[in-house]
Amino acid sequence: MAAQIQEIVDEIVAAMAQESERGDVATYIPGLANVSPAHFGMAVIGADGSVALGGDAEQPFSIQSISKVFALTMALGKVGDQLWRRVGREPSGNAFNSIVQLEAEHGIPRNPFINAGAIVVADVNLSGHMPREAIGELIRFIRFLADDETIVVDDAIARSETETGFRNVALANYMRAFGNIRHSVELVTGVYFHQCAISMSCLQLARAGRYLMLDGLQPEAGRVVSARRARRINALMLTCGHYDASGDFAFRIGMPGKSGVGGGILAVVPGKASIAVWSPGLNASGNSQLGTLALERLAQATGWSVFSARA
Ligand code: GLU
């Protein structure tokens, strides 16, 4: 099995190297604009602990919105289901940074994976902390999940987002006007920008995602969340993890997944695999062009899908 998956990963890496349509690297965050679209990396960790790596699988990149999965897990640990009074659980059908729905829906973001929702989650994680402590807690949680103490925030990216994240500041202010942000906008967006600027490799991300493949268990340390919570986070990733392209991602790949504008995607096949891919060029919906294609090929080659009996 492990050798077979490594063979599939090798084939995918070779095929991706030939692709000329690599999408466009995000430029709205200046710190991301200089990353070469030539990169491609992939890591697949099986439920049995087997690891298949390909391409730039061990090179750290900016995880951006993939951090929303870990931040959500942490916030649920703090306030449980009360979180759902402040954030919805429906796909948005809008761009990741859209403000339009917020007015009609009285400052309650559609889900925790659009920017507005993640900013509310950051507000929850900030409770009782200074921003530095809240970020420290999240980093420690991610290091624990990945069993890797080397994971850090890229301060240059965090600075770059702080200097240019006007839309996110606007979203936070707008929600504060509705009473759905409790701390100062500067502190909340500070937490949000720093969590987006966490740097991880595909291998580290796939390791951090293992609790979602194993019904809430982290293999080295035991239970992280209940099986029910892991299942629910997977459901949100499936329905909301790729912004307004979440339906297309479910159709083409059929796995819970969360993308980030750094070009990474974390995907989970419950009971089978935790997968991370990275290629910085994005498609029109802001999701990794080659990362999506690579996952589609992996799903075809393995039969892995939450919608398939073969999986
Ligand atoms: N830091 C990015 C932003 O807020 C995250 C977006 C993403 O990765 O999709 O714009």
Image (spheres, helix red, strand yellow):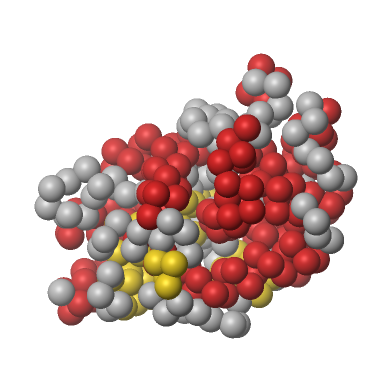
Q: In which quarter of the image is residue 112?
A: top right
The front one of 145 and 295 is 145
Q: Can residue 38 be seen in this view?
A: no
- For the C terminus, give its image quadrant: bottom left
Nearer to the camera, 6 or 182: 182
In the rendered image, residue 234, in percent from the top left (x then y), is placed at 40, 49
* Residue at the far top in the pictured view: 104
**In the image, residue 304 lies at what x, y percent?**
21, 55
The vertical placement of 71 against 11, above or below, is: above
Q: Position of residue 144 (x, y in %)?
A: 54, 75
- Farthest residue toward the left? 310
Left or right of 160? Residue 5 is left
Q: In this view, does 3 lie to the left or right of 277?
A: left
* Picture residue at 36% right of the left edge, 37% below the top: 248
The residue depicted at 60 percent of the width and 82 percent of the height is: 150
Camera sees residue 286: yes
Residue placed most toward the observer, 216 or 89: 216
Q: In the figure, 235 relative to 24: above or below?
A: above
Above or below, comparing residue 10 to residue 173 in the picture: below
Q: Which residue is drawn at 81% across and 60% down?
A: 129
